[in-house]
Image (spheres, rainbow, N blue to C red):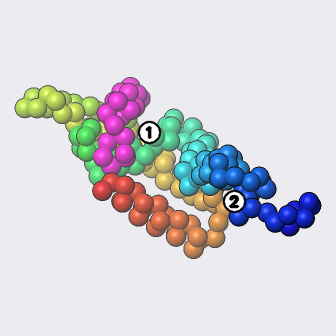
Amino acid sequence: MNPAGRAKSAKTTRTGQAGCHASPEASGAYDVLRIENQLCFPLYACAKEVVRRYRKPLDALGLTYTQYIVMMVLWQYGGMTEGELGKKVHLDSGTLAPLLKRLEKQGLIHRERPEHNERKLFLTLTKKGEALKKKAVHVPGAMAGCIELPQKDLLQLKKLLDKALLAMEG
């Protein structure tokens, strides 16, 4: 019953207005656009914050975070083509090419086009690049605790992110 003593219509909206043409705001249709309802936002914000926290230990190596992940792949797998590297680090050639040029300018990698296939760019570590691996060993320890969660939660987060990434790779 409303204050006038009449029964409310069955079509009353969340705001108490009668009618079937409620505004999207009143019906909650825009709730899907609320930042706190987004999965992508906390992923983005956490990734951005983690990369920011890497800055200090990586500055000592003269590397950005993206250069660091490229170097980790080259330390782990050795020489490979730019395309193979791009797949491993999820970067396209347009992003990877200038990064590789900077690493070469720093003397950390060597880029070479084989005579038999000049469309491919083969990447190898230089002695200086290989030596940097010894200095980089401290970085994971320096980053321990950068996400303040219990170890079991961190392991579960890693497992879920790996699963999501694998699913997106199709």
Q: Which residues are magenta?
A: 86-107
Q: Residue at x 36, y 34 (%)?
A: 96
Residue 102 x %, y % = 40, 28
Q: Is residue 156 above or below residue 57?
A: below
Residue 31 x %, y % = 64, 52
Disc 2 residue type (three-letter): Lys
Q: Of helix, strand and loop, which one carries label 1?
A: helix
Q: Is residue 53 left or right of residue 131?
A: right
Number of other residues with Cα within 10 Å of mark 1, as a class: few under 14, some 14 to 19, many 20 or more: some
Name the chief secondary structure element in magenta. Answer: helix
Q: Is residue 168 above or below residue 59?
A: below
Quarter of the figure that contains the C terminus? bottom left
Q: Residue at x 64, y 70 (%)?
A: 150
Q: Is residue 162 left or right of residue 150?
A: left
As for residue 101 lying within the magenta part, the answer is yes
Q: Nearer the viewer, residue 45 or 122?
A: 45
Q: Of helix, strand and loop, which one carries label 2?
A: loop
Q: Would you name the residue on which mark 1 appears?
A: 67
Query: What label sits on residue 91 in the rendered view?
Result: none
Q: Residue at x 47, y 60 (%)?
A: 161
Q: Would you name the residue on which mark 2 appears?
A: 11
Quarter of the figure that contains the N terminus? bottom right
Residue 62 x %, y % = 51, 35
Q: Mark 2 or 1 closer to N-term?
A: 2
Q: Is residue 5 left or right of residue 108?
A: right
